[in-house]
Amino acid sequence: TYLICKHLKYFEARLDSRRFFRVHKSFLLNLDHIRSVIRTEGGHVIMSDNKVVPVGRSRKKEFSILMGI
């Protein structure tokens, strides 16, 4: 476990945008670890470790285009 005192925007700018996407103001996802996308109730993503991550309203359209749904 690491403790890092940086904003997500710092990592968002440095990570490869083809592999990482910021789906919510609190979540930056590795696209290789998405297991499924739930489009109901605003949208959620289920990750490979079974964590459920919400998709922000402002990012929903861009995320849908990226995922091809």
Image (cartoon, rainbow, N blue to C red):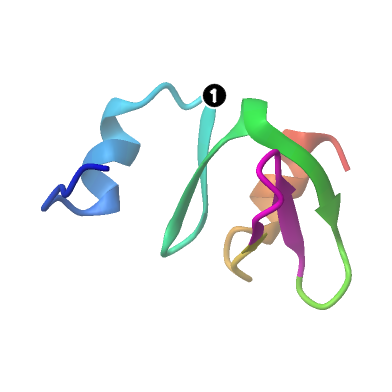
Residue range in magenta is 43-52
Q: Nearer the viewer, residue 14 or 49?
A: 49
Residue visible at 77% across and 47% down in the picture: 64
Q: Is residue 30 above or below residue 43?
A: above
Quarter containing the N terminus: top left
Q: Secondary structure at mark 1?
A: loop
Q: Answer with the quarter of the image where residue 60 lies.
A: bottom right
Left or right side of 64 for 25: left
Say which residue label 1 marks: 19
Residue visible at 84% across and 35% down in the picture: 68
Quarter containing the C terminus: top right
Q: Amino acid at mark 1?
A: Arg
- Counting from the top left corner in percent of width and height, residue 17 is at 47, 27
- Counting from the top left corner in percent of width and height, residue 4 is at 15, 47
User: Exactly how many numbered labels are in the figure?
Assistant: 1
Residue 40 in the magenta stretch? The answer is no
- Counting from the top left corner in percent of width and height, residue 62 is at 66, 48
Residue visible at 65% across and 55% down in the picture: 51
Which residue is at the far front? 1
- Structural crowding at the residue carrying mark 1, measured as other residues with C-alpha within 10 Å and reported as few (<14), some (14–19) or many (≥20): few
Left or right side of 59 for 9: left
Which residue is at the far left? 5
